[in-house]
Amino acid sequence: MKNSIGTSVVLTLAGESHGPGIVAILDGMAPGIHVDESFIADQLARRRPCGATETARREPDDFSILSGVNEGFTTGAPIAIFIPNTDVRSADYAALEHLVRPSHADYPARIKYKGFEDQRGGGHFSGRITAGIVAAGAIAISALKAKDIRIGTHILSCAGVEDEPFGPEPAAQIDRLDGSDFPVLGNVADAMTERILAARADGDSVGGVIQTAIDGLPAGVGEPWFGSVEGVIANAMLSIGGIKGIEFGSGFALAGMRGSQANDPWEMPGDGNPRTITNHNGGVNGGISNGMPVVFNCVVKPTPSISIPQHTIDLRTGRNTTLQINGRHDPAIVRRVCIVATSITAIAVCDLLALHFGTDYINQHDFWLDR
Amino acid sequence: MKNSIGTSVVLTLAGESHGPGIVAILDGMAPGIHVDESFIADQLARRRPCGATETARREPDDFSILSGVNEGFTTGAPIAIFIPNTDVRSADYAALEHLVRPSHADYPARIKYKGFEDQRGGGHFSGRITAGIVAAGAIAISALKAKDIRIGTHILSCAGVEDEPFGPEPAAQIDRLDGSDFPVLGNVADAMTERILAARADGDSVGGVIQTAIDGLPAGVGEPWFGSVEGVIANAMLSIGGIKGIEFGSGFALAGMRGSQANDPWEMPGDGNPRTITNHNGGVNGGISNGMPVVFNCVVKPTPSISIPQHTIDLRTGRNTTLQINGRHDPAIVRRVCIVATSITAIAVCDLLALHFGTDYINQHDFWLDR
Amino acid sequence: MKNSIGTSVVLTLAGESHGPGIVAILDGMAPGIHVDESFIADQLARRRPCGATETARREPDDFSILSGVNEGFTTGAPIAIFIPNTDVRSADYAALEHLVRPSHADYPARIKYKGFEDQRGGGHFSGRITAGIVAAGAIAISALKAKDIRIGTHILSCAGVEDEPFGPEPAAQIDRLDGSDFPVLGNVADAMTERILAARADGDSVGGVIQTAIDGLPAGVGEPWFGSVEGVIANAMLSIGGIKGIEFGSGFALAGMRGSQANDPWEMPGDGNPRTITNHNGGVNGGISNGMPVVFNCVVKPTPSISIPQHTIDLRTGRNTTLQINGRHDPAIVRRVCIVATSITAIAVCDLLALHFGTDYINQHDFWLDR
Amino acid sequence: MKNSIGTSVVLTLAGESHGPGIVAILDGMAPGIHVDESFIADQLARRRPCGATETARREPDDFSILSGVNEGFTTGAPIAIFIPNTDVRSADYAALEHLVRPSHADYPARIKYKGFEDQRGGGHFSGRITAGIVAAGAIAISALKAKDIRIGTHILSCAGVEDEPFGPEPAAQIDRLDGSDFPVLGNVADAMTERILAARADGDSVGGVIQTAIDGLPAGVGEPWFGSVEGVIANAMLSIGGIKGIEFGSGFALAGMRGSQANDPWEMPGDGNPRTITNHNGGVNGGISNGMPVVFNCVVKPTPSISIPQHTIDLRTGRNTTLQINGRHDPAIVRRVCIVATSITAIAVCDLLALHFGTDYINQHDFWLDR
């Protein structure tokens, strides 16, 4: 299983930037989940580059559901989604074929695939492939929402501008993000945009940190060691190009705390559902969900495609040289990565739930004859 | 596969803190790897609590190899290792049975396992289980070293004291760590120890950050999306209790950089092996190893067992109460986690290599008749 | 992993009989394998119904490679193939919606999928899905042939007519099957066809036994217990609808032999490659290939769709009733299953080889710059 | 995953015939399953050689549960069982070290493991390893029985003597087998024993066919293609040394039937639970259980260890030679394989159920506080 992730609910991805399109197969979803194609389209639109801060490349993101959905409901069979590529201009890239782009996959791909890799537009390494994650994730997000499990991601920081973090009860904040084109909780969109534009003006790029919250995940999901909630989610998030780190709860700040500060004391509120007073552990203890919101941050590195000249090598000649990349590039992918993070997290959560509660948990829909 | 990790090289763990002992099965290793039992014993000793800063509980860590090794060499069959428990004093824990220890697995385990979980000494959640990782990892570490692949972990920070990070060519630093009881690169052991002792004097605990380097990993290992080097290693590391975050290369600091700072330019040195001038990406591009050292940091939360009274609930009465933990506890596990991190990383690296190069890659030993 | 099979080389299938089409993703194949689209088309044509004995339904089997192939070579990225459905006439089936067809999946599917399953034309259970296996398998067959590993399947018996079995050195027989429309080794095609037509004239159907040989598989592949060559191939073959049993070598006839008859004595011929004098074990000892041809038989049940009236139940009324199936149906699928069996076997063999020898074994193609 | 089988419920095996013992780890079982150690001991005793027909080697089969069970109940953590070896006489085997025993794993093991394999007593290939399957399976059998799912295996034929097959409602027959030392349904034990003794008198061995029935498996378990009930069980059964074929329901006899004979018509009896009038499909349609008993036969080849001289090669000299095996050997393993077949089937069924219904399905035990 190289291009698949999951155990009971499994996502398989295929496709290249300049090939016919992207294929995602989402397998193991319960039957009877309502599939809203307009929600999938909305999610794909949110992944698209848009506005002043991003590349002008148009990605209309048509898509077709090729299997696994009938009369608007999942059938229980694997769901295949195809997202055709359009507006592909390979000529932009041809000249660079043997120049290794710094911090791209060019060099390791050449060693691994011996030059047979599709190099046009990043090939299978292109961020374009995340459209498959987003389309499949939309179905998972809907299914979870019907079970009152909500997932949302915002830009926690970008180019030095900080957003406010999720609060202790993030459900309303997550709902608010749903309608947003620039996913932030506070009033920081303009400041972030300004910094991104400044980087672009310099032919440069910026990175950031994104924060994801899962609200409503029942306690008891995940495994003590391998298969822990943290391991499963970290594996999913660090499969996404550009994400170089993840931290749960207070994360790296825990290194500077004492146990008496970092521990989350339990209390029994009036409703009889135990809860922790703080959530430094990000909703996971011993690898298992504890019923509190699962919160984690991921760092997104600056887009490696910059137009400033860079030192590199020519693989054909074996000589040092200088690379100048032209073409259309995002000065920041941090906004677009948010929807990808929410999507892959939703799929991972469906897998964790199905493994523990069974395939039908995420949709205990009544028998068809009753619908 | 809940308590197993890996695809071609697989580690399976079993055991509880106060049961008969810990079992680790390491499967998929090549035949013909020399197994040095004294090295396994040394590694287990390094995982033991020792000295002034840690719990006084004695763990002699005898072990038996139950299968998969014959006449000092791996046979290619699964390697089972048993590490018996000794010096178990369950009485220390009995009184707490229904009080939820903050930031331990008590509450989620109760929900998941319905009270059937073994609660004595943390049961299957105990750090004791990591002895299985260390014993199995010792075989992986040896096998890799014979292929000039070195892995080492040091305490990058603890209780506010910072060690120096790995340099661009960490092989010698890794070798130096091998002989060390307190794995740091700089002259910071005393300062760290002092802070740990101060926490213990207060009945409190501290956390830290550990840094791991893999030197000599060939370029071309790992997959573009799922199965990326970062995803595989993150999954392994975040399976270890107490680790709450991971970052590769410059990690979260990348969020504050521009692309022109974060990108690692390539150069062709005299030896004809392409290398990057910097290593902000931690040896991985597009999910695949690029031939540079793979470097990552993990945050270790403060030990949750503290003797300061804590607010919590009693699961039998459903009431709020106060918990005071006595008994023997580490004020810091950060030193002991280093050897666990190196061990699980070595197993993950063996898996990545076996998947790409085949089972025999890590030991192209000649045929038996020639040995 | 529900609709995926394999560990290092993985096939994932999706699609329904009356949906847009079939999707197959073949992942883990080495880069640099030449992909001959006309060979894929030929293989798909051989899976099509044809001639007097089979359904008149037209299946032109156009296909598109959506990813993983560039300039005629595999890239190492996952290969997605789409085979659109055409000539779909759902009306034939609508009337039967609540009548359980005997020996079809109707009843268990209704329980499992709660009525949300796509029932048109068998939905995801349709033999139509095997087109995905055949298209993906064509790439595996080509890759293996370039390594002198040949796989072929013929009809060993059908409706009481027996073909001659594979001989001790089946390579030439396999090559002969490649060009055949009705895959038999002896002069039995007419007799089999006659019996099939007789069954059709009665509104009935027939089954048979198919025999597969793998020639050239190197010794040493497979695992002693789980992951044995027999277990891996049996899992693959019994995943195909209509196949109800498998036997390796002399199979069920071994039950009537003594050890002295069943054992395969070894000899050292002049070429220095040990071989067995007989091959009752079908090329596998202790789960591992022994260098002899791997030979196995699979039983194919009679097509369950017959036009003779059958006793059954109506799921809507819960009453007993009689079912009469009209429409286009094969009186025998045994011919068409041969190519499916060869295809899935080729994929399983690629997986076994990749796991042991590494990803690149099946194509040690030189670096791209040299092609 | 080489020496592991399963997805949600996973069995991992380790051990060699003449090493310290056998280790089995059964992971993914629900918490709260009562573990009866005397039942495990009984099952292990039934796997032992005994009586006139089998080897005189004593195997007392002590065992220890090393983890995953507390106060007589499963905890939900992985269950490790150790079965120490005793009465090991390696000298019997030493002389044969370089002579390839026909139809044993000697030659392929030598190629795969390069001579590092443990050759004493068959090493990891020894039937001794099945003790681990039986011990772990005993827990699965108990858990299923508490859910009214019964599994039993009898000798359907041995050395030409035929037992009567399972009837349409096998529950009572399965219960009857539970108490039997020689698992047959009819009065054929003496005739079979006589034939086995006759083979032994000739220094030869015999094979047979075993038949397994699963009664009470709910409809709707298993997957349409990969992960089918047949594929999962076939994989499990063909992982056992000596089993060379499997057939479900009427199996290979289906090849000679017409559809009108082979199809299983449905009827609605008074109790409102649909059932088929015949069961030629062995309880599985389209890969999914249909609520009828799952019935399958497996062929067991004659024990390859015979004392009649055999033609073979000497791997050290590369020359042809003659092999005469002395020592203690079973003239028939068909009796002992029955309990192994039941055990591995029970584990596979637990996995199928857990994947569909969730981890807790096989034991919906009340919360601990209520026990």
Image (cartoon, coloured by chain):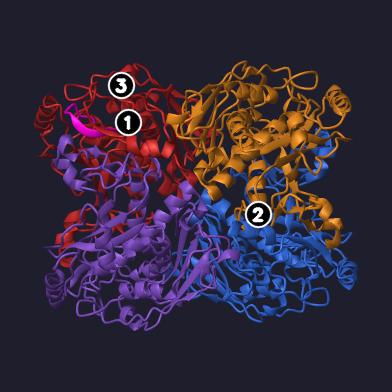
Chain colours: A red, B purple, C orange, D blue
Q: Crowding at label 2, few (<14), some or many (≥20) Cα neighbours within 10 Å? A: many
Q: Which residue is mark 3?
A: A95
Is circle 2 on the same chain as circle 1?
no
Does residue A353 show up magenta in the picture?
A: no
Q: Which residue is mark 2?
A: C288
Is circle 2 on the same chain as circle 3?
no
The residue lying at 62 percent from left, 66 percent from top is D124
Are the residues at dot 3 and dot 1 in contact (C-beta closer than 8 Å)?
no
Q: Callout 1: residue from which chain?
A: A
Q: Which residue is mark 1?
A: A317
Q: Callout 2: residue from which chain?
A: C
Are the residues at dot 2 and dot 1 in contact (C-beta closer than 8 Å)?
no
In terms of depth relative to the viewer, which is nearer, D164 or C133?
A: C133
Q: Marks 2 and 1, how far apart in space?
A: 46 Å
In terms of depth relative to the viewer, which is nearer, B41 or A331?
A: B41
Amino acid under disc 2: Ile
Between circles 2 and 1, the one closer to the viewer is: 1
Amino acid under disc 3: Ala
Q: Marks 2 and 3, how far apart in space?
A: 49 Å
**Vertically, is A215 above or below A80?**
below
Q: Crowding at label 3, few (<14), some or many (≥20) Cα neighbours within 10 Å? A: few
Q: Is residue C169 left or right of residue C318?
A: right
Q: Secondary structure beneath disc 2?
A: strand
Is circle 3 on the same chain as circle 1?
yes
Q: Callout 3: residue from which chain?
A: A
Residue A149 appears in the rendering: no
Q: Secondary structure beneath disc 3?
A: loop
Residue B122 at x, y percent in the picture: 35, 71
Q: Marks 3 and 1, how far apart in space?
A: 14 Å
